[in-house]
């Protein structure tokens, strides 16, 4: 019997602002299926209620929903889970709530980048992503492995990036996304990056579908966070299932396991 992995999406199945978000969700489903083994099943889950992700304070409201769905997935017998957004929402909190492996798109992509090269840079889709991702690099302790000068840059603005992603999917042509990405990625290469990460799980999934893996003809690999997160989840699930190796439960760790009765009481108190 193969593995079962939950991809926990940041958005609801029906988005009030983007009625064609199902095109992106379908791309994620197709991309993850392409990446994992044939006997691994990936299920795409959504948040039940929509919260904007335009501000960290509002984005925080999405996270309990995402964590609760992963807790439920473990109870349903899933072998691993992915927090499917480059913000790695509720990643550490969810790891402390379950025993199955949980990966994040950003952390997985940064880990993979360090095994493919020496200095990485990240090209995000939104300008507002830059300070958030810079903070992620610091939190994960990867500052010395990123380029010094502006390690995070944006290939888009904020007002039309989502529409461009949907348009590329409708046209079955990612040219606009790749062109915008490469323009910024080439500057990163000139500043010393020998690996460039696509700083969005959704655009990364589109890159996976079209097999986009290199910045121009530079020899610099492009890491997709969707590929990195799902493949690392599959590997950790194998290690957990076949060798019994799992995350720490030491009291020295931030991943001290939460008691299930306390989790249940807290979730009920919040109406989850």
Image: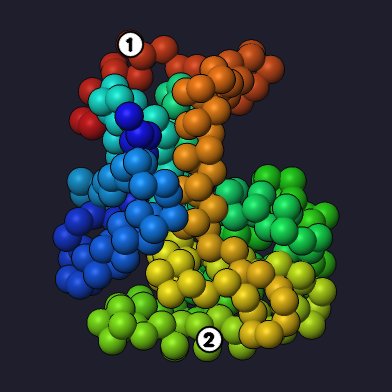
Q: CA distance from mark 2 to mark 1?
A: 49 Å
**153 to the left or right of 166:** right
Residue 70 lies, with reference to residue 19, above or below; the image says above
Looking at the rendered structure, which numbered label has been put on residue 123?
none
Q: Which residue is mark 2?
A: 180
Q: Earlier in the sequence, mark 2 or mark 1?
A: 2
Q: Which residue is mark 1?
A: 261
Residue 7: x %, y % from top left: 36, 46
Residue 237 can be seen in this image:
yes
Circle 1 residues within 10 Å: few <14, some 14–19, many ≥20: few
Q: Nearer the viewer, mark 2 or mark 1?
A: 2
Residue 37: x %, y % from top left: 42, 46
Foreground residue among 173 and 136: 173
Foreground residue among 252 and 43: 43
Q: How is the image coloured?
A: rainbow
Q: Residue at x 65, y 22 (%)?
A: 253
């Amino acid at each position: 019997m193969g593995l079962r992995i939950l991809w926990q999406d940041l958005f609801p199945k029906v988005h009030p602002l983007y009625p064609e978000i199902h095109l992106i969700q379908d791309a994620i489903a197709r991309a993850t299926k392409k990446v994992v083994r044939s006997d691994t099943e990936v299920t795409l889950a959504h948040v039940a209620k929509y919260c904007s992700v335009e501000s960290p304070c509002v984005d925080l409201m999405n996270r309990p929903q995402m964590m609760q769905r992963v807790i439920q997935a473990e109870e349903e017998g899933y072998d691993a889970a992915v927090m499917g957004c480059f913000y790695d929402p509720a990643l550490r909190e969810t790891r402390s709530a379950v025993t199955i492996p949980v990966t994040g798109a950003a952390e997985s992509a940064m880990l993979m980048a360090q095994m493919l090269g020496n200095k990485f840079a990240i090209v995000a889709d939104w300008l507002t992503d830059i300070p958030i991702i810079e903070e992620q690099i610091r939190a994960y302790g990867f500052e010395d492995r990123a380029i010094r000068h502006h390690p995070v840059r944006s290939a888009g603005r904020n007002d039309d990036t989502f529409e461009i992603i949907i348009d590329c999917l409708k046209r079955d042509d990612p040219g606009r996304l790749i062109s915008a990405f490469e323009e910024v990625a080439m500057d990163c290469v000139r500043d010393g990056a020998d690996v460039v990460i696509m700083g969005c799980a959704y655009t990364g999934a589109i890159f996976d579908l079209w097999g986009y893996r290199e910045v121009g003809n530079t020899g610099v690999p492009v890491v997709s966070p969707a590929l990195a997160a799902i493949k690392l989840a599959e590997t950790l699930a194998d290690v957990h299932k076949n060798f019994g190796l799992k995350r720490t439960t030491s009291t020295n760790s931030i991943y001290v396991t939460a008691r299930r009765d306390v989790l249940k009481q807290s979730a009920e108190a919040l109406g989850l």
